[in-house]
Amino acid sequence: MELIKKYIKKCKSVLKDLRARYYLTRHHTQGHEKIRVAFIVQMPEIWNKISPVFEKMCNDDSFYPFLIVVPSFNIVTKDFNSFGYELQYFKKLYENIDVFEFDQININELNCDYVFLQRPYDDYLPKGLKAIDLVKITKVCYIPYGYAPSKVFYDMNTDKEFFRNVYFFFTDSEEVLSIIKQKFKYNDLNQIQHFEFDGYPACESSLLTQVKEFDKQKPTITWTPRWSTDEIIGGSTFLKYKENMLDLKEKNDIDLIFRPHPLMFDNFIREGIMTKGEVDTYLDEMCRLGISYDSQSDISVVLNKTDILISDLSSIINEFFLTGKPIIYTSGMNFEFTDYFKHILENEYCADNFSEVEDICKTLLKKSDSKLIERMKYIDQLKKVHIGASSRIVNAIKEDFLNH
């Protein structure tokens, strides 16, 4: 019986591959005067991953870029939330750009040449705006919404269910490029799908950020615990350190920003780890102590304010590292890290318990950063990889439009 199930699953996968390949080979330039590119957006928190590309297109007369906003998805209720902060955020940010509400448009009538998606999860998008639907009418494009610090994420970050329907995948590393090319070898060799590593736009933005020395009297520390307690994918120090962080604020003259993963509290409530009442009580205590709780801003805005980052295993580390500012990493070393992430950790600080977190904080608050020089040397090596990433991606779209 088990063999039959595996055979059926394999047959279904082959049929899905053939379906996607059929649609991928049908799309050609539609003859528009300008290249029409839709960005389907749902989470302001991760907008910085593709915003450099969007803004390059906004400043290029060859393009007509626009936004289609979808409300956030509630993983507890398994349904879409009502429109709220995400619609306000994008309309305020781009007052002179077309910003459409997803339920007010017909995607077929917009005649998109390309569509960028924020995340590789069709389950969180409405019918018609999923990659499996979009592949029938346009060329789906994707830039990763987070850098994978451990090889354990490689398979889920190249999942066939989503990526078989993607025309352009601009990867975040050479390693991921190699994996995706192997998974879709036939499509890659026959140029049915296009996979490129052109640098990572979010890294480019971090490298171009003007870093200022923090104010000794009032530095800003940001804490970014992970969303899941599953140790295989990094675990979360929130439950272990939540009271300690309150004490850290009370004992030091600092600004403290609490920026958990956007799904953390919803996930804890869903799994019965915390109740909504317990979450509200904790956030009220943070507010009383003057700790800023930020769950919705573009992460780059938060990181630009930050002088010291205390973080679990997260792609945020990758971006913040490139600013040259110090990181205290808290998730432990029992992971198969990527080579790149190993280099990051060699030039940052690792803490196995909160006593070590406090000791490192005390040293850094005295402006003693013993790893700064080596960190900056490594960052200089990465500039040639990432600076120019958004321009290279925009040029790849242009070239494809002209030739296909």
Image: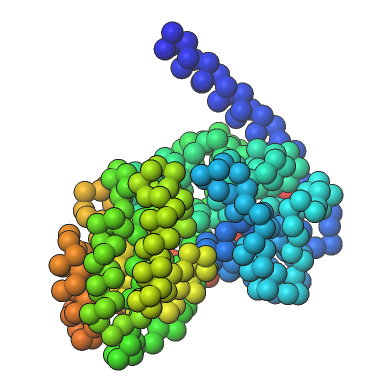
Residue 207 seen in the figure: no
User: Quick one: quadrant of the N terminus?
Assistant: top left
Residue 319 screen position, x and y as percent: 41, 67
Residue 98 seen in the figure: yes
Pick whichever, 100 or 58, lies toward us: 100
Quarter location, residue 264:
bottom left
Give the colour scheme of this rendering.
Answer: rainbow
Which residue lies at the image location 48% right of the left edge and 42% below the top edge?
158
Which residue lies at the image location 25% right of the left edge and 82% below the top edge?
252
Residue 372 screen position, x and y as percent: 25, 78
Residue 105 screen position, x and y as percent: 80, 52
Identify whether 74 is placed above or below 390. above
Identify whether 148 is placed above or below 375. above
Q: Is residue 367 left or right of residue 103?
A: left
Which residue lies at the image location 37% right of the left edge and 70% below the top edge?
286
Q: Number of labelled discs?
A: 0
Pick whichever, 323 or 306, lies toward us: 306
Pick whichever, 252 or 58, lies toward us: 252
Q: Is residue 373 left or right of residue 278?
A: left
Residue 135 screen position, x and y as percent: 69, 41
Q: Is residue 172 left or right of residue 62?
A: left
Pick whichever, 35 or 49, lies toward us: 49
